[in-house]
Amino acid sequence: MSVASLQLEAVSNDPQFRHLSSIAGIAVDLRYATPDNFVGRDLYSPIDCAWLHRDAAAALEQAVAWLAERRPDHHLLVLDALRPQRVQQQLWDALQGTELLGYIAEPSRGSIHSFGMALDITIVGPDGQELDMGTGFDDLSERSHPALELVMLERGEITQGQVDHRRLLRDAMFQAGFFGINSEWWHFDCGDRVLVRQTYTRVL
């Protein structure tokens, strides 16, 4: 079965997608548009990757509302949203021959980011700083793994406060229909990834 596809340059004219600037109550700092990521270089400029599929955008608005009701002095910070297939290929190529390849979806299968249906996201506190999650974004180590949090807590490698911050983020995202993954506390898929790959449009 062939997957529908669209060039990134056509996204702005496609009603399936919404720009992040249309979502109230979030901050945006796309790390792949800066050198502040594990590859160490800007992978996005001059293209605009501040987009989500409209379904993911609506779910993000639910997460914003949930957090605003419970922690009005906190807000969500989007670190990555729509990541076109061409950039996914660059990430895949950059990790060849390393032990980190398992962190990247194989381009032929497609990252959920490339459908505009995944987010990398964190929370900013009342002091304007990101909450301490135990690692930074793109820290590709076991300390970033939600599945290992209790083990890391027992070893003293992360603190209860850091785990609490991660749980707050997960609570906000899960109730809005997002799903986390075992290896990155910051990554959330909107809906079932198998269904996304089968029925949504991939951005190239």
Image (tube, rainbow, N blue to C red):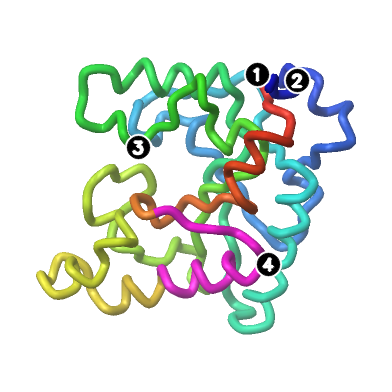
User: Label 1 crowding class (10 Å Cα cut-off): few <14, some 14-19, many 20+?
Assistant: some
Structural distance between the alpha carbons of marks 3 and 2: 25 Å
Q: Dots 1 and 2: beta carbons under 8 Å? A: yes
Find the residue positioned furthest to the front: 1
Q: Which mark is residue 23?
A: none
Q: Which mark is residue 103?
A: 3
Structural distance between the alpha carbons of marks 4 and 3: 27 Å
Horizontal side of residue 38 vs 67, given as left or right: left
Structural distance between the alpha carbons of marks 1 and 2: 6 Å
Give the structural element (helix, strand or loop) at label 4.
helix
Residue at (35% x, 63% y) in the render: 133
Of badges 4 and 1, the one in the foreground is 1
Structural distance between the alpha carbons of marks 3 and 1: 20 Å
Q: Amino acid at mark 4?
A: Val
- Image quadrant of residue 94? top left
Q: Which residues are magenta?
A: 166-181
The residue under label 1 is 204
Task: Please state the horizontal and vertical placement of residue 187, each as a whole percent of the image.
Answer: 48, 50
Task: Please state the horizontal and vertical placement of residue 140, each as a whole percent of the image.
Answer: 28, 42
Find the residue positioned furthest to the left: 155
Residue 135 among those drawn in magenta: no
Q: Dots 3 and 2: beta carbons under 8 Å? A: no
Task: Please state the horizontal and vertical placement of residue 108, each as a whole percent of the image.
Answer: 51, 19
Give the structural element (helix, strand or loop) at label 2.
strand
